[in-house]
Image (spheres, rainbow, N blue to C red):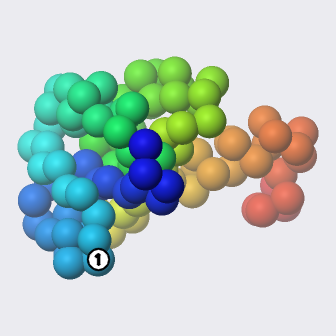
Amino acid sequence: MESGKLAIIGDGDSITVFKAAGLATFPAENEAKARETLRAIAKEYKVIFITEELARPLTEFLKRFDEQPYPVILSIPSKNGSTGYGTELLKSAMERALGVDILFNN
């Protein structure tokens, strides 16, 4: 695996700009396609971004990637804006790692 290899899975409009930034882009119109794509590329990429609309319904599926160092799966807003899902995941990961909520002080 090349170091720093990055990819993004999402709807076509949301991922187009990432192609210009050098990321491998994988369009997915629904969560079934996103799951299939993620399975196919997981061993090839170190960091995989997935748009929030696709990540949310795949929450349980994505948890299996928490047990291994790579790939790191990160949820990002789509062209429609943030749903807050990525922030929820970050908060949860920090609480698991540290035992406290240091980001949001709740």
Of all residues, the one furthest to the right in this rendering is 99
Q: Is residue 23 left or right of residue 62?
A: left
Residue at (43%, 51%) from the top-left corner?
2
The type of residue carrying mark 1 is Ala
Q: Quadrant of residue 95?
A: top right
Q: Is residue 6 above or below residue 33?
A: below
Q: Is residue 71 left or right of residue 30?
A: right
Residue at (21%, 34%) from the top-left corner?
37
Q: Is residue 76 above or below residue 35?
A: below
Quadrant where the image shows the N terminus: top left
Q: Is residue 13 above or below residue 89?
A: below
* Mark 1, residue position: 21
For the image, the number of numbered tags is: 1
Of all residues, the one furthest to the front in this rendering is 2
Q: Is residue 26 visible?
A: yes
Callout 1: SS = loop
Q: Is residue 93 above or below residue 80?
A: above
Quadrant where the image shows the C terminus: bottom right
Position in image of residue 76 (x %, y %): 41, 59
Position in image of residue 50 (x %, y %): 34, 49
Q: Is residue 49 visible?
A: no
Position in image of residue 4 (x %, y %): 48, 59
Between 43 and 1, the one nearer to me in the picture: 1
Position in image of residue 43 (x %, y %): 39, 32
Residue at (29%, 77%) from the top-left corner?
21
Mark 1 surroundings: few (<14), some (14-19) or many (≥20) residues within 10 A: few
Residue at (10%, 59%) from the top-left corner?
12
Between 66 and 29, the one nearer to me in the picture: 66
